[in-house]
Image (tube, rainbow, N blue to C red):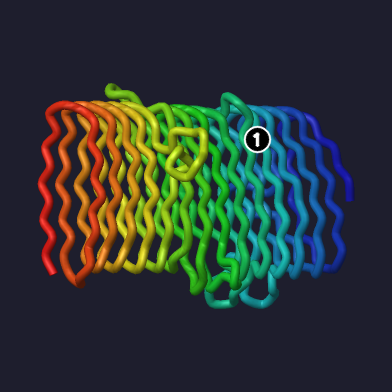
Amino acid sequence: MSMSAMATNKIYVTQAGASLVFDVLQDGDGNKVGNSTTASTVSGSASNFNIDQVGDSNILTFDIHGDSFTGVFSTTGNSNNIDFNCDSADATSGCDSINANITFVGNSSDIDIDVGLTTSKSGDTADIDITGASGTDSTVVAATIDGTSAVLTLTIDGDSNNYLINIDDNGDVNGHTLIMTQTGITADVDVVQSGNYDNIATVTTTGDSQNIDINQTAGGSITATTTGSTSAAVKTVNINQTGHAVFNTDGTILGQTSSGLAGAGGTYDIDQTSTGTINLDVNGASANVSIEQTSSGTVSIDAAGASFTADIDQDNASTLELHHDGASADYVILQTGGSGDIIDLEVNGASANVDIIQRD
């Protein structure tokens, strides 16, 4: 099935049957594939889509009920809306294999992705790529994926964007994977990964005034590289890992060439509630780091910059290695519970204030 449309056209599809190929181009403003209240629907074992919308205020809504889906959704223009669902409210079919590629150019887009049901464990393998070109400002991306193995890749270049990411269900032995690259100021990022196996999140952000929250509830690894915080427009990074976990920054502490968490005035809060490892590279004045490990853990920090503040609380047979270059540092270190706690502290700079408590 192939269609081409110009200016304020509407397409509604209700398809039942296997092996649908659907190719659409809509050029103009206000076009619709489905609408905000009635989505187009496809029921069948295999679907292949290619939908392009060029213009402003276009709407694309589709519900897929089938075992496999391959699709490309592309919008060019401002104030466009993509709403893609695969078995988000239907447990009768598997939604077993999903490969979706979503690209958009323009401001004020709304991207909403729902794949699978927790109860039906749909979305067995979901590979979803979302790409926003340079200048895609004021975008909202909401992605909820339930499945066995989910890989979500986000690459967006624009200011004042908002991300709500939730990837859950059991996961396979490799867990779920998020790869995210955000360039631009004033971003709000909220990520939840859960399941029974280790998850992976790799997040790279550039720009000031960003608020990043990542919550892993089943253990796993997070690798973060973030730059651009300024004293007038600080960046906030909050990490919460409730299973055995690793948090890394791609900085010099791991032999990389980047600065890990870089920029003045950044605030970084990292909590691990099971056995954990933290490798943290911080570069910038007036950075504030807070770390809490409630089980045995290892923390390695390489920091550079004046007026650095670190508040570190380790609860059970833990190790801390901290190297700091810069004046006017303030450290509060508490190690309690268990035995054999280790602190290796190296400070280069005037006016350092260090408070250490070790208690079995």
Query: How many marks are shown on the rendered structure?
Result: 1
Q: Residue at x 40, y 30 (%)?
A: 186
Residue type at mark 1 is Phe
- Above or below residue 274? Residue 358 is above
The vertical placement of 324 against 230, above or below, is below
Relative image position of residue 243 (x, y in whole percent): 39, 68
Measuring 44% from the left and 28% from the top, which residue is drawn there? 207
Residue at x-position 17% and y-position 51%: 333
Q: Position of residue 173 (x, y in %)?
A: 59, 72
Residue 89 shows in this picture: no
Q: Is residue 207 left or right of residue 331?
A: right
**Is residue 15 shown left or right of residue 86?**
right
Q: Is residue 129 left or right of residue 251?
A: right
Residue 105 at x, y percent in the picture: 64, 30
Q: Position of residue 212 (x, y in %)?
A: 39, 43
Given the current orientation, which residue lies at the most extreme top position? 232
Viewer-proximal residue among 257 and 172: 257
Residue 245 found in image quarter = bottom left
The quarter in which the C terminus is drawn is bottom left
Q: Quadrant of residue 338?
A: bottom left
Report the side of 185 relative to 99 (left or right): left
- Which residue is labeled 1 in the image? 104
To which quarter of the image does residue 310 belong? top left
- Element assignment for label 1: strand
